[in-house]
Amino acid sequence: MASNSTQCSKNPSREVGIAGAGRVGRSLGKLLNERGQKVVAVASRNRARAEAAAAFIGREVQAVAYTDLPSTVDKILIAVSDDSIGRIANTLAEAGLTEGTVLHTSGIYGTDVLAPLIAQGNSCAGLHPLQTIATPQQGVQKLPSATFTIVGSGRAAEWAEKIVNLLHGKILRIAPGRKSTYHAAAVIASNYIVSLIDAAVLVMGAAGVDPKAARRALAPLVQASVQNALAERPVKALTGPIQRGDIQTLALHLQGLALVPASIQQLYRAVGIQTVQLARKQGLDSAVARQLEHLLRRSK
C-alpha cells in the first residue's frame, strides 16, 4: 500500500489513526470523528477495505499503510482481531512509533499484547465495548451509551475514559487479571445466545417448520425471556419443564432430539444441567433435581 502520510499533517494534540478497517474500527472511528476527535487515517492490509473504511468514517480520512501511522498521527486505536493485535503492535513499533498513545479494543487482552510499543515509550491501554456490532452502521447506533471496560493507566487510559465520556457510556470495572473471565461472560451473553437461537430454529426445522417461520414464531418468546431475565434475577425469570420438575417431558424432549445433530443434543443437555441448578435455587425438590440431572447426563 502506497504511503499517504504527505496528505495528513501530524498534529499530536488532536489527530487519530485507526488500525483496522472492520466493523469496530469503522464505527468507533466515525463516532470519534463526529464528536471532535479528528480521525485522519485508517490502515488495513487490504487497500480496498482501508478506502471503504476511510469513506465511512469521514470525507477527509485517508487510507494508509500500517507503517504510515507513526508519521501521520499521535493517537492510534487498534481495532483488529485478537490474534492480529500483537502483529500490528510489532509493525507499529518497527515503523518507529514512540511516545504515542495507543488503545486496543480487545475484550480478552490486557496491555501485555502491546509490549513492543510500551518498550518504546508509548502509553498503552485497552478499551473494550461490551456490545455486539454486526455492521458498522449498527455500531454507530449502539455504541453511544454502551458499557466499556478499560485496562491500563496513564494518558492512554485517560484517552479511553474520554472516549467513553464522549459516547455517554459507562465504565465497567473488573478484577485485575480477570480479563479472560470477563470476556467469557460476554461471549455467553452474546455469541452463545445467537447459537442457542440458531439451535432452536434447527430443532423447529426437524419438527417441520420453515426457518423463517420459526424465527418469526420464536422472536416474542426469546425477547420476553431475555427481558424477564434482565429485569429480574434469572432465578425469578425461569419457567418451563425443568423449573416445574416435569421429568417425563424432559425424557420426551431427549427422544425428539434424536432427529437433530449430536452437537445440538449435547447443547440441550449441557444447558439443561445448568437450568437444573437454577431451578434448585427456585426451590425445586432435591430428589426431582437429581432425577433430572441423571436423565440429562445419560449418553442415551
Image (cartoon, rainbow, N blue to C red):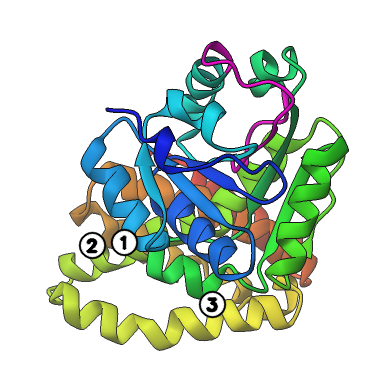
Quadrant for residue 106, please give it. Answer: top right
Quadrant for residue 230, please give it. Answer: bottom right
Which numbered disc covers residue 198? 1
The amino acid pointed to by label 1 is Asp
Would residue 208 be found to the left or right of residue 154 on screen?
left
Mark 2 vs mark 3, foreground winner is 2
Mark 1 vs mark 3, foreground winner is 1
Q: Earlier in the sequence, mark 2 or mark 3?
A: 2
140 above or below 19?
A: below
Q: Which residue occupies 62% across, 69% down?
A: 35
The front one of 31 and 288 is 31
Q: Which residue occupies 49% across, 63% down?
A: 30
Q: How busy is the neighbourhood of tag 3: few (under 14 within 10 Å), some, or many (20 plus)?
A: few
Disc 2 to disc 3, how far (Cα)?
Answer: 20 Å
Disc 2 to disc 1, how far (Cα)?
Answer: 6 Å
User: What is the chief secondary structure element of the magenta stretch?
Assistant: loop
Which percent across, then down, holds residue 154?
87, 36
| Residue to which mark 3 is pinned | 240
Q: Is residue 106 magenta?
A: yes
Question: Which quadrant does the C terminus fall into?
Answer: top left
SS label for mark 1: helix
Check contact, mark 2 vs mark 1: CB within 8 A: yes
Which numbered disc covers residue 202? 2
Task: Please provide the residue range marked out in magenta.
Answer: 93-111
The front one of 91 and 105 is 91
260 above or below 94?
A: below
The front one of 270 and 97 is 97
